[in-house]
Image (spheres, grey):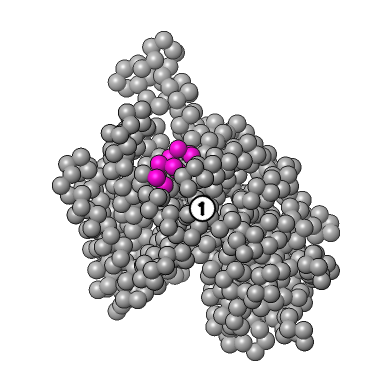
Amino acid sequence: MPSYQAPVADALFLLNDVLHWDRYNNLPGFSDASPDVVEAVLGEAAKISEEILQPINLSGDHEGCVRNADGSVTTPKGFKEAFKAYAEGGWIGLATNPEYGGQGLPYTLATLVNEFSASANMAFTMYPGLTQSAIAAIDKHASTNLKQIYLPKMIAGTWAGTMNLTEPHCGTDLGLLKTKAVPQADGSYAITGQKIFISAGEQDLTENIVHLVLARIEGAPAGTRGISLFIVPKFLPDATGNPGARNPVSCGSIEHKMGIHANSTCVMNYDGAKGWLVGEANRGLNAMFVMMNEARMGVANQGLSQSEVAYQNAAAYARDRLQGRSISGPKAPDKPADPIIVHPDIRRMLLEIRSFNEAARALILWASLHADMATRNPDEKLRQTSEDILGLLTPVLKGVFTDRGFDNAVKAQQVFGGHGYIAEGGMEQFVRDARIAMIYEGANGIQALDLVGRKLPKDGGRALTAFLSEVNAYLKEEEADAAMKPYTSGLKQGVSHLQQSTVWLMQNAMAKPDNAGAGSYDYMHLFGLVALGYMWCRIAKAAMARKAADASQAAAMDAKLIAGKFFMERMMPETASHLARISSGADTMMAMPAEAF
């Protein structure tokens, strides 16, 4: 049976030693998140993840969700009780608006809590996770009246939220959507259409479900310019704000899918369902992007979470499993064989996973800090810089973390050998669950195109300039520190490759856009390696300082320094391959006629 232990100590090290959490205590929300509060929050998050969510992960995967004859859905055994505990613990509203019952703590803290819960039970965490994303969109774009009706109950976990974008004929190209909205005399709209792949579209965990639905108002322009966003509840709120009459929205079926079996992925049918406009008419994508961007950060976190839990189980297995002898001589002569942790290739796989996990956790926390700064910092210029960097990083986090997360789950499964392929061991579930994260919330190829086509040139490249300026300033600051050379030299080379690839795209993509498309995926991963490498430099610097200040931490800090050095020696050099592929252009890739494939 798989196990999980939340990495609380590592999270606290990152917050306190690497990201210097105390420097932000003058900002709203951060002043309430003192070191003792943060430690208590993470400790309790670890407890609910390890003791309530993880024990029902494997059983929930085996049992799955069931659609009943009346269209209702029954979630796996234990999920209803777990959701009640999660909601009553205040976890859904941890970083939400206090005006509507939220705690108003930093989003950065919620990022860690969501990682812990997703590692313990990814399918479960999608229920409150989507609710949090819906809360963000409603809070930013809905009218005061709609906020007052929906936000308190969603923050409390009494009601849940979903996002409804995809239709049978359109996924990424939302301009093709057909769901229509007809204005009604009372100011509402009648929503008619079908949505597919709707995570948590129907469930038995909450008394109401609040669907955020993209639709086109009759007479609106074609394409994305004519899309609006609507709140469409399962039950219409009555005069007291409680669930009243049933709205004509229903679950037509549940998808039978590769993983996340315990989350109900539904086909949703809207048959003249009553909905209310969120934000401006024909500006629905603008409002939905709040939810989508928050969801993309959440999906990036899922990639890390599956990598982390898979690593923990693989490392434990490698220490215990006896098989063969070390090629340099027996390491456990008193036993019939050595534990497989002695074999270099096992260590290669484990270190590839671990060196990603630690830097990825630092990177998503750094990005989350920028998300907090973009909304809480009183300095307008600094808010803008944080918003720029967050926008630049979001497709990188989503694409790179989920690609690596899946690859790492496969590596961890490989450590188990044949036992990793057997369902009862739980490793194959991590592989199956991790796979969806590469696809939903914008497939990773789309994330790469978004990065190269939209985020890089936006505002004259202002975001990339800010990122590179910070990294280059750091390298200059550390250039005289000999102890940092094993880390900074690799980062310096990676930055050079990133700059060369950026220049190549600037020179070759305008006249021939296929060059941008052909190089975008490699560019995204090159960028990701540089960003992860920057985090490793900061981790290494902090680890050296902690080791010097506290001898009791020497072993833990040495492990970080070794993992960081491994990353620089074995993973950062991949930037050269990405650069070579980018600069090869699109000619060969686009030369073969379609019928020849």
Across and down, in percent, residue 44 comes to: 58, 41
Eyeballing the image, is 76 above or below 146? above
Residue that lies at the very extreme toward the left in this rendered image = 480
Residue 20 visible in rendering: yes
- Residue at the image position 37 percent from the left and 49 percent from the top: 20
- Horizontally, residue 73 falls left or right of residue 171, namely right
The one nearer the camera, 178 or 111, is 111
Residue 328 lies within the magenta run: no
Dot 1 surroundings within 10 Å: few (below 14), some, or many (20 or more)? some
Eyeballing the image, is 423 above or below 407? above
Residue type, numbered disc 1: Asp
Eyeballing the image, is 177 above or below 353? below
Across and down, in percent, residue 186 comes to: 77, 84
Residue 431 visible in rendering: no
- Horizontally, residue 236 falls left or right of residue 440, namely right
Residue that lies at the very extreme toward the top in this rendered image = 334
Across and down, in percent, residue 137 comes to: 58, 68
- Circle 1 sits on which residue? 32
Residue 10 lies within the magenta run: yes
For the record, the magenta segment spans 7-16
